[in-house]
Image (cartoon, grey):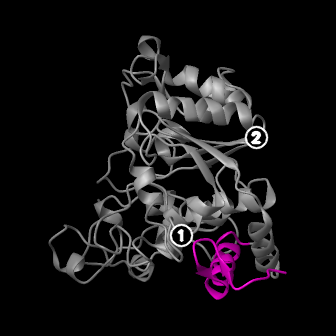
């Protein structure tokens, strides 16, 4: 049971319990686990977090700082001791490096290593280096004594844009480096996306803080709660897909009417993510709702796919149909399939 009236920077008990209920629901935890999640978060000491930003754009950090209800600063930074983060920390240069090394030593086998950005192997690692070390050397050293590793963003999970053909820097994702034996294998969770949803990051972090492990993961080590369904399954434009109503151009009448964007290359049917159900900017919207096809950014190799604006080919699985059932995109008599 959670006692007291305020939590974490003045957060009210009501707001804290509401947040825990949201996390439990978002993580698809069994009924009643919200209370145990709240109790665990309330009594846990803040675990140390080492966050490496390697070959990326810091978009994942930007996304996480936009977590809400409550906001990132009010809860997440109070649940975690963010001992090293090259974007968010106040210290710089030698002071920042000293803080990182001190935390690595003092929290051996207990800290969480978060990796943002891909890891380049080309040119001896010179494409991403800091304090005289390549990204691979930093990651190898930190992973050796980490309790667990969280890869955030498509660059850290699958290589992302840096790994797109011809991949001149030799960029790799964290799981691939573990498979290659280049860094120690540790309990790993992947949160792909360009960037990932803020809630996916904050909820996954909270689960690790509360229970000392990751939520249920799929075969690509993604939390099923956020990557268990496709964008298509929950898309508000799905009824138009089923009726065969498709926008042919971004400026035609179908686009203005909010018809399905399948023929404009939407990758929603092949992309597992919770954008359609969780949304962005306080659940205000997401790309497809705003009029742009899904690019498939949470899937491996999405930059090297069949083109962002080319329609998917083959039958499309539809949630709610019998297991294994698929549907081909229906076309009205006055439309021609591309």
Write the residue at 61% across / 29% down: 101
211 relative to 324 in the view: left or right = right
Among the 4 quarters of the image, the one containing residue 5: bottom right
Indicate which disc residue 239 carries.
Answer: none
Q: Is residue 278 left or right of residue 17?
A: left
Mark 1 vs mark 2: give the one in front: 1
Give above or below for 50 relative to 251.
above
Observer-nearest residue: 263 or 109?
A: 109
**Residue at which label 1 appears:** 74
* Picture mark count: 2
Residue 323, position in %: x, y? Answer: 70, 69
The secondary structure type at the circle numbered 2 is: loop
Extreme left residue here?
Answer: 251
Q: Is residue 228 visible?
A: no
> First in sequence: mark 1 or mark 2?
1
Left or right placement of residue 338 versus residue 316 in this view: left
The Cα–Cα distance between marks 1 and 2, rounded to whole angstroms, is 25 Å
- Which numbered disc covers residue 147? 2
**Mark 1 in CB contact with mark 2 (< 8 angstroms):** no
Q: Nearer the viewer, residue 244 or 235?
A: 235
Tell me the quadrant of the picture where the N terminus can be found: bottom right
The location of residue 146, given as percent across then percent down, is: 72, 36
SS of the residue at dot 1? loop
The local crowd at label 1, few if under 14, some if 14 to 19, many if 20 or more residues have their Cα within 10 Å, is some
Q: Which residue shows up at 65% across the image and 36% down it?
A: 103
**Residue 53 x %, y %:** 47, 38
Write down the region rendered in magenta: 1-28
Residue 129 at what x, y percent from top left? 43, 22
Question: Relative to residue 74, is residue 156 depicted above or below?
Answer: above
Q: Residue at x 22, y 68 (%)?
A: 248
The residue lying furthest to the front in this view is 95
């Amino acid at each position: 049971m959670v006692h007291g009236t305020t939590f974490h920077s003045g957060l009210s008990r009501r707001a804290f319990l509401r947040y825990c209920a949201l996390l439990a629901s978002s993580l698809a935890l069994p009924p009643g686990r919200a209370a145990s999640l709240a109790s665990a978060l309330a009594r846990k000491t803040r675990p140390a977090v080492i966050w490496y930003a390697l070959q990326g754009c810091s978009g994942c950090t930007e996304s996480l700082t936009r977590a809400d209800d409550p906001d990132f600063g009010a809860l997440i930074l109070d649940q975690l001791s963010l001992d090293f983060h090259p974007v968010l920390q106040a210290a710089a240069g030698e002071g920042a490096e000293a803080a990182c090394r001190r935390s690595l030593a003092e929290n051996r086998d207990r800290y969480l290593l978060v990796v943002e950005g891909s890891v380049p192997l080309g040119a001896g690692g010179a494409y991403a280096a800091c304090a005289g070390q390549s990204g691979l050397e930093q990651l190898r050293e930190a992973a050796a004594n980490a309790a667990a590793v969280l890869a955030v963003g498509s660059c850290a999970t699958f290589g992302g844009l840096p790994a797109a053909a011809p991949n001149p820097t030799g960029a790799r994702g964290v799981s691939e480096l573990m498979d290659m034996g280049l860094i120690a294998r540790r309990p790993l969770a992947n949160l792909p996306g360009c960037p990932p949803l803020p809630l996916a990051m904050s909820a996954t972090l909270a689960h690790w803080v509360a229970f000392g492990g990751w939520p249920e993961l799929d075969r690509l080590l993604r939390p099923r709660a956020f990557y268990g369904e496709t964008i298509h399954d929950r898309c508000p434009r799905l009824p138009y897909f089923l009726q065969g109503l498709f926008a042919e151009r971004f400026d035609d009448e179908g686009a203005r009417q909010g018809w399905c964007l399948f023929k404009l290359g939407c990758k929603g049917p092949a992309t597992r993510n919770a954008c359609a159900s969780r949304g962005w900017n306080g659940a205000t919207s997401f790309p497809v709702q705003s009029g742009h096809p899904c690019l498939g950014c949470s899937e491996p190799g999405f930059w090297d796919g069949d083109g962002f604006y080319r329609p998917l080919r083959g039958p499309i699985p539809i949630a709610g149909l019998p297991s294994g059932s698929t549907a081909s995109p229906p076309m009205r008599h006055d439309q021609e399939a591309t």
